[in-house]
Image (cartoon, grey):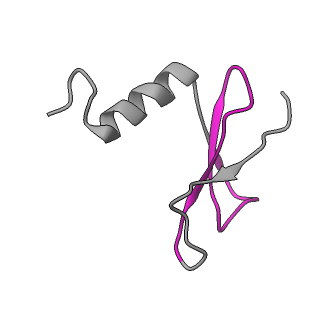
Amino acid sequence: MSEFEFRKSSYSNPERECVEVATNHPDTIAIRDSKRPDGPTLHFRPRTWLALQAALRGDAPDAP
């Protein structure tokens, strides 16, 4: 698997917890805690990641 290139959200604040996401791999979206870059990493398939984003925005088909 290739090296992940993580980036912080534009909403990130140095004094707050934030997540970093890596979207440079064709098969996996990787997410980690910005305060613990050597800690665990969550991996999502791109389709699942898009569905999660849609649900968080409230525009997923089954969103209330």
Q: Quadrant of residue 22?
A: top right
Q: Is residue 29 above or below residue 33?
A: above
> Which residue does the image show at 40% across and 26% down from the upper left?
51
Seen as rendered, the residue at the extreme bottom is 15
Q: Quadrant of residue 36?
A: bottom right
Give the quarter of the figure containing the C terminus: top left
Seen as rendered, the residue at the extreme front is 10
Seen as rendered, the residue at the extreme left is 64
Q: Nearer the viewer, residue 44 or 16?
A: 16
Q: Is residue 40 magenta?
A: yes
> Which residue does the image show at 20% across and 24% down from the upper left?
62
Q: Is residue 43 above or below residue 14?
A: above
- Horizontal side of 32 relative to 47 (left or right) equals right
- Horizontal side of 52 relative to 21 (left or right) equals left
Q: Is residue 56 magenta?
A: no
Residue 48 x, y percent position in the rendering: 47, 25
Q: The magenta stretch spans which residues?
A: 16-41
Q: Is residue 46 above or below residue 14?
A: above
Q: How many marks?
A: 0
Residue 33 x, y percent position in the rendering: 61, 59
Residue 49 x, y percent position in the rendering: 50, 30
Give the quarter of the figure containing the N terminus: top right
